[in-house]
Amino acid sequence: MVGLSVKFRRDETKPILCLVSDQSVNTCLQFAHDHLMPAGNSCEELLLSAVSGYIINLRPQQASVKPTANKAKDVAKAVDVQAKKLKGSANISDSSSSGKKEPGEAVPMASGRGELKTGVESAEPLVLEGIVHMTLESDYRERGKGRDQTSAVPKRVEAFAPEPWVLEEVKRERKPLLHLIVIGHVDAGKSTLMGHILHLLGRVSQKEMHKNERESKQKGKGSFAYAWVLDEGSEERARGVTMTVAVAHFETPKLRVVLLDAPGHKDFVPNMISGAAQADAAVLVVDASLGAFEAGLEGEGQGSGQTREHAQLVRSLGVEQLIVAVNKMDAVNYSQKRYDFIKASLHSFLRQCGFKESAVSWIPVSAIDGENLIAPPSAAALKSWYSGPTLLQSVDTFEQPLRNTRKPFRLVVAELVRSRTLGQAAISGKLESGAIRIGSKVLVMPTGETATIKTIEQDGEALHDALAGDSVDVGLTGVDPAVLFTGGVLCHPDYPVPVVTRLEVRVLVLGITVPILRGAQVVLHGHHAKESATVAELGALLDSKTGTIVRTKPRCLTANQSAIIEIVPERSMCLEEYSQFKALGRIALRDGCKTLAVGIVTRIVSTQ
């Protein structure tokens, strides 16, 4: 918020204008000049208090910054900004003509009410007993207040051209990188399955496995030894369930794989969504045990289980390639009849989710016995009827999606990390587009701070650069760690990601029992971000097959309907239109432990 009060001294007729703001010096100067300077000599002085701890004494022909005491600090830094004299309608400051901006530096501004270069909207004054109050909506995030915010007009994405070094790196031969997420109902054996594969591939030492076996037996959880390869948290091991998305790496003959082991419990679906936002392909693990498969699909009479919900979510988040791993086949004596029943039950449902039949593989496995994981099955009961590929061979057939290296840089913050090599301001995430290298300038959104890439690491190995599709840990310099948080976005300084306050989305309503009404309170999930939100408008009902409008302004939305709606998050979010950046244009609406709808951003109605 930017608040303005105009007060009159008792002994003088000239007013003093006090502008209190949580914005940067540049933004305050822009706002003051565009809205107040036309008053000319009616202002004796203008005091702007910015979050950086400065008080700016703005006079008609010069701008200076004086140090002042701050509530949080006794003394703030002093910065002097000398502005050039006005010449007609020329700018009050030309300090950025060199193309370089320093903290606290005034930006060029038109003397009249011309085009705004910061996107600041005009505000009408409200006069009350000699005191004028003006407000400027800004929705500045309290998680970190920017000290060096950009005020440049964003460029159109279509105008972006990658730097020459990026084109050279793209030409370099690299082993394709694939992000693989493992999903499924709770207790389906996801962590055990992938932990056993990592052990067989040599990614887990025999010493570590012996330790896991010993400790799991001591706690009465002997069958969890392989799961503990990925479930490293003490609470996860005590409860026997995965709670966060575990990350591991391995290689197949053709691919480098980033493994994302998602939690299956319904309480941790938001974490699963965060992991699925990074995924290129998925392994859906189902439990072949009698009753367990049915519970995962139907939810034990309490709505849909996580087998159903996870499949719907990963497809809505862009995953097109899928392996269905029918696990715990040893519990049913490797019965072909049971395998065929599970395949028939899931086949039509996966088609409804949008998976193409040619993109889905079916693999019978036993995670605990290691059957059909990286080597052909040895169990006679399974060999008698199955002669297809192993799970690892099937993973090796996945294709790497096209990478957007020719679009502006975007990296969604998946996690905050701490290490000696990366420093205090460090994050982990996947490059959705563009490229970075050590020394690159980036913009931290939604706070708007500028930072410099200090270090890049991948699986503990130092890199000089990273391209779209790479999952990396990044150390930053020149930025306060407080402005970094999960769901934020690092982006190209000249092509910032929109900070959205209202958006239009096209959604597919899932199997809900209570209709969605205008004004409904939901949780909006987009990539790694989630915010409480309100369904502000029900725009139109659509034909689910053709996409044509069936009815405008419906009263409510019910199960399996497709619609256009408008959503207002409580706090601004970094999102893009799906047509511009697919990864940042997918959303899900949830309430409690249920997913209500999935969809894509069709239009950004308003931004910060």
Image (tube, helix red, strand yellow):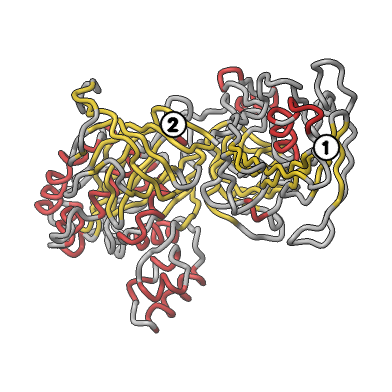
Instruction: Residue 475 in the image: state x and y as whole percent.
Output: 68, 50
Q: CA distance from mark 1 to mark 2?
A: 51 Å
Q: Is residue 410 above or below residue 460?
A: above
The count of marks equals 2
Q: Nearer the viewer, mark 1 or mark 2?
A: 1
- Displayed quadrant of residue 418: bottom right
Instruction: Tell whether 298 sits left or right of 160.
Output: left
- Residue 397 in view in this figure: no
Residue that carries the numbered disc 1 in the rendered image: 44
Label ID, residue 317:
none
**Is residue 210 at all visible to an observer of this figure?**
yes
Point 66% across, 50% down: residue:
145
Q: Amino acid at mark 2?
A: Lys
**Disc 1 and disc 2 in contact, CB within 8 angstroms:** no
Mark 2: secondary structure: helix
At horizontal 46% and vertical 74% (from top left) the residue drawn is: 234
Q: 410 left or right of 90?
A: left
**Measured from the top left, where is residue 246 in percent x and y?**
46, 58
Q: Is residue 87 left or right of residue 403?
A: right
Q: Amino acid at mark 1?
A: Glu
Q: Which residue is mark 2?
A: 582
Question: Nearest the camera: 92 or 229?
Answer: 92
